[in-house]
Amino acid sequence: MMSTADRIDRRAFLGRASAALGLAALGSTRGLARASAPGGALGAAGPVDSPFDWAEIRPGVFATTNLATGGNCLAVAGGGACLLVDTKFPAFIPRIARDVEIMTDHAPTHVLNTHHHADHSGGNMLFTDTAAVIAHENGLPRVRDQFQRNLSGITGGRRLAARLPEADRRATIEDVARLLDRAGDYTAESWVANTPVSTARTGLDLGGRRGAGWAEIRHFGRPSHTDNDLVLHLPHANVLHTGDVVFNGLHPYFDANGGCSSAGWLETLTDLDDLCDDETVVVPGHGPFGTRLMIREQIAYIERLRDAVKQGLDEGTPLEELRTRTFPFMEGLGLENLRENAIVFVYNELTGG
Ligand SMILES: [Zn+2]
């Protein structure tokens, strides 16, 4: 669903997010540095020189919100351990892994998939033999089913590399060539998490840093964006990675085949808001990091969408007309290619279609 991601003005999002949180004093990214005036307050180098524009959002917690390359990743340094949240598409994961090792002084020992979508789990094959790869059990068969798509993320990796700035493509094309050499060894299972979870709360032990107060995986027991959404809560750092339960500044993706429910999604968003205070750094599945305001904006989008479709139904508006509309709450959002899908999904949901 990220095929037109390049349309997004990433720098504008980054600027808005950093301003909202006053993050200039934290480790700024190459992208933030570029977005500021020469010699400006954001002139410091990022935590690693990378096309993924990593930012150190809290000490030892790193995020990349590069939109064109898949879901937002988070890297968390532990005690002789390291957690990577989400693995983008296959072509990008070797570079992501190198970046993470530089930033945290450790290769990922734990990998968390926020859900099964291929732009969040596509790089799993690099870790399933060497790390604890954690996902909700509902997502495992779905990952198995997308094997051909994952494989095409390797065979079509050169095309994916074109989503990076030209200066950064060569190294990724070399990574893709190495992945292609091994592509015959990969099976569907190469992408399937080896550490499924099903409980509402799972404490993570990252090299002795453990417990509910340090790092916790949450599942809210209901379908939301998919039927297998997990979020990462870091109480010690006051950071929340929401996965695709939040799209920031973008149309959200309603996956009719992934167990999505707009009503469940609203309830889960309320649960996420309850985990936050005004200082929490929220990392969405796509779009810039920011504050809990993005959770409330996501609630408003879904509520207004459901109201607009209900009203259209009450007025007898045919779906063919309804799906062409842009409602006021949709204006200015990125991922315009997902607008129509959102209307059609809720229409089908409300009519049992
Ligand atoms: Zn998704």
Image (cartoon, rainbow, N blue to C red):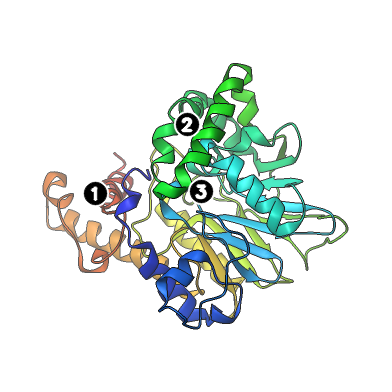
Cα–Cα gap, marks 1 and 2: 26 Å
Q: Quadrant of the C terminus?
A: top left
Q: Which mark is residue 298?
A: none
Left or right: 82, with 223 as reference point: right
What residue would you read off at disc 1? Answer: 340
Q: Residues within 10 Å of mark 3 (few under 14, many from 20)?
A: many
What residue would you read off at disc 2? Answer: 153
In the picture shown, does residue 110 fall above or below 12?
above
Question: Is any part of residue 41 visible from this angle?
Answer: yes
Cα–Cα gap, marks 3 and 1: 21 Å
x 69%, y 37%: residue: 127
Foreground of the two, 32 or 220: 32
Residue 74, image x and y in percent? 61, 57
Cα–Cα gap, marks 2 and 3: 27 Å
Element at label 3: loop
Give the mark nearest the N terminus, 2 or 3.
Answer: 2
Three-letter amino acid code of the residue under disc 2: Gly
Three-letter amino acid code of the residue under disc 3: Pro
What residue would you read off at disc 3? Answer: 223
Question: Is any part of residue 187 visible from this angle?
Answer: no
